Image: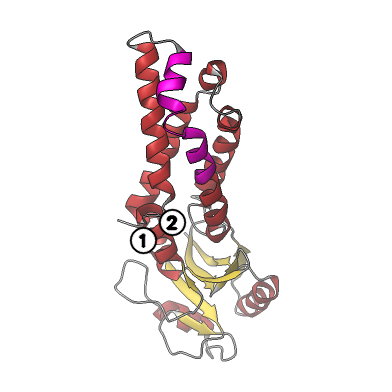
Amino acid sequence: MNTKGIGIISSDKTIFNHLKRRLTAAEFEPYHLSTPTEKTIFDYHILSTPLFIGQTYVATTALWKKYFKATQPTTKLITSGFQAQQHSNHIDLLNWPDDVSLFLANARTVSEEWEPIAEGGLDIQRKLYRFFEGHGDESLTDVLHRILMTLTMAHDEMDKYQVAYTEVYEELLQHSNIASKWQLLLNRWVNYLPHFAALPFFTTFKSIDQALQTIAPYFEGGCTNEQLLRNLDCLETLRTIKEDLEIIARQYVN
């Protein structure tokens, strides 16, 4: 690990610059991180709380703690903000510790049992739970599963039983309103995506967003074109999206 480097996760440039000045004065090397990777392994990470994401203040510490516990279990996650609270892993920006090096040395690692401070803002864990497990008007994965099930049945009819696409469309795809379900999926995706922009898995979400854009022409055309279905590899793309989301759910929700 880089013992003098500190990764900083912040959505506010002014706060980042303030942290950078104070930490540099204490002889540390601050680095701004949007999404940590294996190349950014530090003994310490400082998270500005709450983060401002999608025009909303969001509480993210618990998720980042889970992420680092899985990827860098000996790192120390320090929150920083204007919450005047005493905590082994929190820096009050208006009341810095007298000895920053000593404070960091005494902070607890992400593998130890401790609860983050009450940082305020939208509870992103609850939002994430609704994304995966919600019902009715909230769950995105529920709609995804219904679309995937319908397309799987359509491919089975065509590939196993040699049913013509026109017949599959009329009796299955059109009847199940798959194009409408797709639009519902996109609407929910657009609603959720901005809230996840500064979370550990956002790189995966960006890849999913690109994949959805790639297969969109088939659904936007009303699902009438068999060649688009096959050439865009819609079924396999949706299966990959489902698998990627399940990995995130196992780590952060379940």
- Which quadrant of the structure image shows residue 157? top left
Instruction: Specify the label residue 138 is tagged with.
Output: 2
Q: Which numbered disc, 2 or 1, marks the residue closer to the eye? A: 2
Vertical placement of residue 106 versus 47, above or below: below
Q: Is residue 121 left or right of residue 94?
A: left
Vertical placement of residue 171 versus 23, above or below: above
* Residue 51 pos. (x, y %): 56, 70
SS assignment at label 2:
loop
Q: Nearer the viewer, residue 23 or 154?
A: 154
Vertical placement of residue 81 versus 150, above or below: below
Which residue is at 41% across, 60% downward? Answer: 68
Q: Is residue 121 magenta?
A: no
Kind of residue indicated by mark 2? Glu
Say which quadrant the C terminus sits in. Answer: bottom left
SS assignment at label 1:
helix
- How dense is the environment of label 2, judged by Cα within 10 Å: few (below 14), some, or many (20 and up)? some
Answer yes or no: is residue 194 visible.
Answer: yes
Which residue is at 47% across, 30% downward? Answer: 237
Magenta residues span 165-185
Q: Is residue 180 magenta?
A: yes
Q: Nearer the viewer, residue 84 or 178?
A: 178
Colour style of the rendered protein structure: secondary structure
Which residue is at 40% across, 83% downward? Answer: 88
| Secondary structure mainly formed by the magenta segment | helix
* Residue 66 pos. (x, y %): 37, 62
According to the picture, the residue beneath numbered tag 1 turns out to be: 69
Which residue is at 48% across, 56% downward? Answer: 200
Kind of residue indicated by mark 1? Lys
Answer yes or no: is residue 35 visible.
Answer: no
Instruction: Specify the label residue 183 is tagged with.
Output: none
* Residue 247 pos. (x, y %): 37, 45
Precedes in sequence: disc 2 or disc 1: 1
